[in-house]
Amino acid sequence: MNISIEKKEFVEAVHKSARFAEKKTGTLPALSSILIIASGDGIKMRATNLETGIDLKLNGKVISDGVVAIPATILQQIASSLTHEGTIVLEHTGDTLSLKSGMGKSTIKTVAYDDFPSIPFPENPKNRMVIPGVLLRSLFTSIASCASSSTIRPELSSLYLSVEGNILTAVATDSFRLAEKKIPLSNKGTQGKFLIPAKNALEIAQALPDEDIIMSFDEHQCAFVGDMGMIVSRLTNATYPDYRQIIPKESIVEAIVLRKDFEQALKRTTIFSDSFQKIRISFDSKKNTLSFFARNPDIGESSEIIPAHISGSALDLSFNYRYLSAVLSLTTTESISLTAAGIGRPIIIKGITDTSLLYLVSPMNQ
C-alpha cells in the first residue's frame, strides 16, 4: 500500500477513528487498531470496539492498493504532532508502515488485520430518516449527561429515541431528573423507537459532520451515513420505562424568571449547600419572588431572592443543585419557567419560547 493524504484530513480522520478503537488493554490487538484501506474505491479508515464502529472516507491519492492495521494510540500520537500544512505519505512494506512528512519519517510495526471484525449495518433499510448532523450532535451532547452513569439498569444509561410523524424525540433519565428534547424532521421519518447507550451517543456526536446524514436502525444497531462515511452503534436490548407517567399533568404554581437571574442566584447559593448538595426554592406569589436558600453547618448559610412572575400557591421545595443547574446547558432562552405540582412532586423547567425542551427534576426530602 502506498498513499498520499493532506495532513489536515489525515489528522482529523485519525482522531475521529481513534474514538472508536478499543481502549482496554489485553484485548484483541486488531480492536485497538485503526484499519487503513486503499483501493480503487479510494482511502478508508476503520475502527471498532464491537460497541461502536466507524468507516471513514478520505480524500487522497492511491499509488498502490493495500490494507494495514496500526495501533490507534500510536497513530493518534503521531497525528497530534503534525502540523496541518502539506501532505503525508504512508507506505506499507512487510510488517512495517512508514509515514513520511516533509523531511521526517516514522516507521511503525503493523498489527495483523485478519482478526479485524466487520462493522455491521442495520438490516432493514426502511427504518431511515434524514437529519442534519449538527442538529443530531447538539441533541446527543445536550441530553446524554442526564442518563444514568451506572450500568445496573442499561435502559437508564441509554438515550431513548422515538420517531412519530415528523418529530424525533430524545429522552434521558437517571431516575432523579429527566430531559426530553424534540426536533422536527424535514421529511416524515420511519415510525419507530430504539435505545442507544449514552456513552456511544457522545462518541458518535464528536464524529458527526454538520451536513445532512441518514440515520437508520433495526433491532440490534443504528447507523449514521453521510458523505464522510458511516458510523454504527449497537442498541440497548431493554424496555424503556413509560416516562410520561411521571410528568405531572397539573400544577399548583408557576414561576417565570430571567435565565441570568436564575443562574447567578443558583451559583451563589450552591456555595453554601450541604454534603447532600441541597438547596431550597420558595415560590412567593404575593411578593412575586423566587427565593433560594442553602445552609452548611461547617460554612454558613445563604439566601438569594430574584424577581419572578408567580401564578399559583406558595410552595417550598428542596433539590440537588446540580440537577437544577443542568437545565442551563439544555436551553438558551432568556427566560425559563418552573412549574410545580406540590410537595414531593417533580418540578418541570422549560425555556420560554423553546417548546422543544421539557426538563423534570425530583425534589429531595425537606
Image (cartoon, helix red, strand yellow):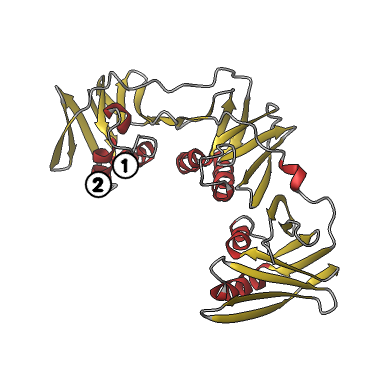
In this rendered view, identify the residue nearer to me: 283 or 93. Answer: 283
Q: Write the residue at 21% across / 31% down.
A: 90
In the rendered image, which quarter contains the C terminus?
Answer: bottom right
Question: Where is residue 313, by image quadrant?
Answer: bottom right
Image x and y of residue 257, in percent: 73, 69
In this rendered view, identify the residue nearer to me: 53 or 152. Answer: 152
The residue singled out by tag 1 in the image is 11
Q: Residues within 10 Å of mark 1 (few under 14, many from 20)?
A: many
Instruction: Answer with mark 1 or mark 2, whichever residue precedes in sequence.
Output: 1
Three-letter residue code for mark 1: Val
Question: Where is residue 288, by image quadrant?
Answer: bottom right
Give the secondary structure at mark 1: helix
Q: Write the residue at 58% across / 58% down.
A: 329
In the rendered image, which quarter contains the N terminus?
Answer: top left
Question: Where is residue 323, by image quadrant?
Answer: bottom right
Number of marks in the image?
2
Which disc number belongs to residue 82? 2
Q: Decide: marks 1, 2 in contact (CB < 8 A)?
A: yes
Q: Is residue 159 left or right of residue 287?
A: left
Image x and y of residue 15, in percent: 35, 42
Q: Write the residue at 33% across / 18% down.
A: 40
C-alpha gap between disc 1 and disc 2: 8 Å
Q: Write the residue at 27% across / 29% down.
A: 29
Three-letter residue code for mark 2: Leu
